[in-house]
Amino acid sequence: MSTGWRMLHTMIRVGDLDRSIDFYTRLLGMTLLRRQDYPEGRFTLAFVGYGDEAGHTVLELTHNWDTKGYDLGTGFGHIALGVPDIYAACDALARDGVTIPRPPGPMKHGTTVIAFAEDPDGYRIELIERK
């Protein structure tokens, strides 16, 4: 059944769309691929990613105009990004005021070097060193 299927995007709801777009584009190096307002529904969708939607999985940022923030809940885990130098990445993010709740180091039950950063809404971004 999965022939021809592929992951298109992951969606998260954000409280301040411009702040989130800045975080994902300026600080994490993604590109704003498209942004569309839906006045009748009172929401805006923005898609960001590391490549075009035709060939890459992207992140959908949903901003509901009348909602300022969300309870992150306990079901969502994190978004994972591969980085070539995790220590340099975390240093650069921290200099820009990004919270790094788990600094770089080997994962608890393995040897993969990981870290976690938080986006402006508190979503966890796992950074995985991929040399």
Image (cartoon, rainbow, N blue to C red):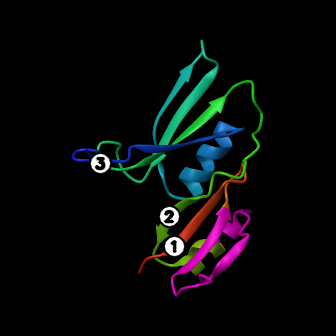
* Residue 45 within the segment the image draws in magenta: no
Dot 1 lies on which element?
strand
Dot 3 lies on which element?
loop
**Residue at 43% from the left image edge and 77% from the top image edge:** 130
Identify the residue under disc 3: 55
Q: Quadrant of residue 34?
A: top left
Dot 2 lies on which element?
strand
Q: Position of residue 28 (x, y in %)?
A: 55, 59
Q: Quadrant of residue 40?
A: top right
* Residue 93 within the segment the image draws in magenta: yes
Instruction: Quote the CA–CA distance across marks 1 and 2.
Output: 6 Å
Look at the numbered discs 2 and 3 and tell me whether their residues touch, using CB distance below 8 Å: no
Identify the residue under disc 1: 128
**Residue at 57% from the left image edge and 54% from the top image edge:** 26
Count up the numbered dots.
3
The N terminus, quarter of image: top left
Q: Position of residue 98 (x, y in %)?
A: 71, 62
Look at the numbered discs 1 and 2 and tell me whether their residues touch, using CB distance below 8 Å: yes
Q: Is residue 129 left or right of residue 92?
A: left
Q: Earlier in the sequence, mark 1 or mark 3?
A: 3
Q: Amino acid at mark 1?
A: Ile
Q: Is residue 101 left or right of residue 55?
A: right
In depth, the one of 64 and 31 nearer the eye is 64
> Which mark, residue 81?
2
Instruction: Quote the CA–CA distance across marks 2 and 3.
Output: 17 Å
Q: Amino acid at mark 3?
A: Gly
Q: Is residue 67 left or right of residue 56?
A: right
Q: Is residue 5 above or below residue 77?
A: above
Q: Earlier in the sequence, mark 2 or mark 3?
A: 3
What segment is highlighted magenta in the picture? 92-117
What is the crowding at mark 1: few (fewer than 14 residues within 10 Å), some, or many (at least 20)?
many
